[in-house]
Amino acid sequence: MNKESLRKFWYSLSPKHRFFIRRLYYFPIDLLDKIQGKRHKYVPPRGSIYTGSPANAEAYIDQGQRQLMLLKNHIDLKPNDEILDIGSGIGRTAIALTEYLESDGVYKGFDVVKLGVDWCNSKIGKDFSNFEFKYVPLFNDLYNTSNLRAEEFVFPYEKDAFTKIFSFSVFTHMQIGEIQNYFKEICRVLKTDGLAFSTFFLYDDSNENHISTENKFKFPIKKNGYRLMNEDVKSGNIAIHKNTLKTMLNKENLDLVEIIDGFWKDKSNYSKNASYQDIVVFKNA
């Protein structure tokens, strides 16, 4: 079975079955890590890591440090910032921030997977009083079968609450209407002089054919202004045309600051400090 067929089969499974298979598959090596004392207090076992690549503790912490570096480089993240992490997952970025944020800095994160939120609160939140994780039971056909819809979700935070907002590999797993609503909410909770950072799969007219037919990681299903990897699991992966993204930001009174192309569609963009996905920096107009 090739990678594309395997991915299609994986997306055909329910979230519950995907979580179970992942835990079962990684159980032997997770057990070995525990026996050999290679676990880290804040790092979950591989079988519980449902976003990104499963990794041992050392690699997981390194991934978080790389994400922190991107935030420092592209939105000038400061130790005393008031931060919102959209899609906080199971703590990949938060772990790095525990060593960077000062006591007057604030971290708040939310996620649609209760497993991740419970882990973060029981480990990170327990030791750092300025870190808070919320579970929001939103429907996502990749992670959650709840009835609450992201198109109608209101972030559980006050207006102008944050100086910096970020998300890693969240808008790559959401539908257009859901992303549009999140842009509206980001505009509401981001301070006037704040900055937002998010990663996407983006394309334009010059590389649409490549990312739909030639690239190993491809989006063959064409829609109006965006492309899907799988018709049946619309949150599996989505690629958005850059013009569509700009229109969506403008609709919510957000200004595009810059786009930094990742190396997912062009390996020549690879460097040790580069992002696999495309980075978008934006702010309130």
Image: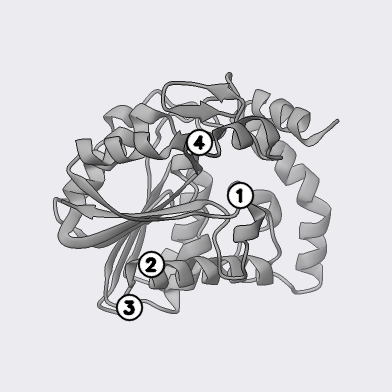
* Residue tagged 2: 74
**Mark 2 neighbour class, 10 Å CA radius: few under 14, some 14 to 19, many 20 or more:** some
**Residue located 27% across and 28% down the image:** 152
Q: Amino acid at mark 2?
A: His
Determine whether the residue tagged by mark 4 lies in a helix, strand or loop. strand
**Which one is nearer the viewer's eye here, 280 or 123?**
280
Q: Which mark is residue 79?
A: 3
Residue 263, by quadrant, is bottom right
- In this rendering, the answer to whether 111 lies above or below 130 is above
How far separated are the C-alphas under marks 4 and 1?
A: 11 Å
Marks 2 and 1, the one that precedes in the sequence: 2
Residue 64, by quadrant, is bottom right
Marks 1 and 3, the one that precedes in the sequence: 3
How far separated are the C-alphas under marks 2 and 3?
A: 15 Å
Q: Point out residue 36 in the picture as x, y percentages from the top left corner.
A: 81, 73
- In this rendering, the answer to whether 53 lies above or below 222 is below
